[in-house]
Amino acid sequence: GQTMKCNIMLQELGGKYENQYVAAMLGNTAGCRFSPGDLVAVTLRFSTREYNGAHYQDILVTDIAKIK
């Protein structure tokens, strides 16, 4: 089968220069749509792997909800 996937850019609260993350959303979560500036609460899963001496990091959204 196929799984839907999309990326989302997230920024921590606090100001213009707070940490930013690009995270993948999979399955039903990938169907969620947000606009720039929407306030969301997110649970992220960070994973790393090594391949041929290089290290790669994946960030996956495991739960996301828009805050009113």
Image (tube, helix red, strand yellow):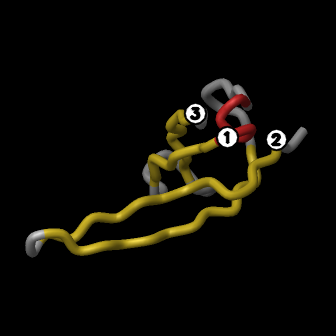
The amino acid marked with disc number 2 is Lys
- Residue 36 location (% of width, % of height): 61, 27
Nearer-N-terminus badge (2/1): 1
Closer to the camera: disc 3 or disc 2? 3
- Give how far apart the Cα atoms at labels 3 and 2 are: 26 Å
- Residue 17 location (% of width, % of height): 43, 51
Which residue is nearer to you in this view: 13 or 27? 27
- Residue 62 location (% of width, % of height): 68, 58
Q: What residue appears at the point 71 percent right and 29 percent down from the top-left corner?
A: 31
**Badge 1: few (under 14), some or many (20 or more) residues near its Cα, within 10 Å?**
few
The amino acid marked with disc number 3 is Gln
> Left or right: where does residue 33 sit relative to residue 52?
right
Nearer-N-terminus badge (3/2): 3
**In the rendered view of the protein, which quadrant contains the C terminus?**
top right
Relative height, residue 17 to residue 45 (above, below)? above
- Secondary element type, mark 1: helix
Relative height, residue 43 to residue 39 (above, below)? below
Q: Residue beneath label 1, please?
A: 27
- Residue 65 location (% of width, % of height): 81, 46
- Give how far apart the Cα atoms at labels 2 and 1 are: 18 Å
Nearer-N-terminus badge (1/3): 3
Closer to the camera: disc 1 or disc 3? 3
> Left or right: where does residue 49 sit relative to residue 42?
left
Q: What residue appears at the point 71 percent right and 34 percent down from the top-left corner?
A: 38
Cβ atoms at labels 2 and 1 below 8 Å apart: no
Tell me, for residue 2, which label it has, or none: 3
- Give how far apart the Cα atoms at labels 1 and 3 are: 9 Å
Q: What residue appears at the point 57 percent right and 33 percent down from the top-left corner?
A: 2
- Secondary element type, mark 3: loop
> Left or right: where does residue 51 sit relative to residue 60?
left
Q: Residue beneath label 2, please?
A: 66
